[in-house]
Image: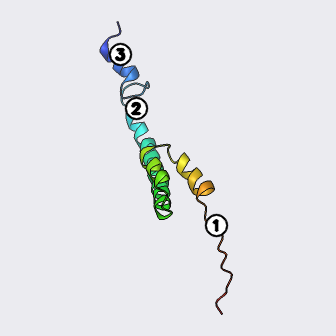
Amino acid sequence: MIPFMEYMQFFGTGMGLGYGTSFLWAPLVGLLILWSLVWKGMALWRAAHRSEKVWFIVFLVVNTLGILEIIYLYFIAKDKPSTNTTQLS
């Protein structure tokens, strides 16, 4: 049987890197959270303005670190060019 302290040193808060290394992961996790929130916010805003309830709920429930949101914003919900060609003089 593995003693508890040896187990915690390898699998505990240090993620297998020993004691005191969990602080190294905090900035990475913070950046991933910020990245995800930015893309999620933009996708939720676009889905709400386009009245796409299904996409809105999917973005609200599913967390893909921004991957699904980027696909939606750039490939699915991209704005169509305006057909209004009148120019103001």
Q: Are marks 1 and 3 in contact (CB under 8 Å)?
A: no
Q: Amino acid at mark 2?
A: Thr
Gap in angstroms between the C-alphas marked 1 and 3: 59 Å
Which residue appears farthest toward the bottom when viewing the image? 89
Secondary structure at numbered mark 2: loop
In the image, is 8 to the left or to the right of 66?
left
Q: Are there few (<14), some (14-19), or many (20+) residues within 10 Å of tag 1?
A: few
Quarter holding the N terminus is top left
Front-lying residue, 82 or 7: 82
Q: Amino acid at mark 3?
A: Glu
> Which residue is found at the position 40% from the left and 20% from the top?
10
Indicate which disc residue 4 carries. Answer: none
Give the residue at mark 1: 80
Q: How is the image coloured?
A: rainbow
Point out the residue furthest to the left here.
4
Q: Which mark is residue 6?
A: 3
Q: Which residue is mark 2?
A: 21
Q: Residues within 10 Å of mark 3 (few under 14, many from 20)?
A: few
> Rounded to the nearest whole Å, what is the CA distance between mark 3 and mark 2?
15 Å
Q: Is the residue marked by circle 2 packed among few (<14), some (14-19), or many (20+) residues within 10 Å? A: few
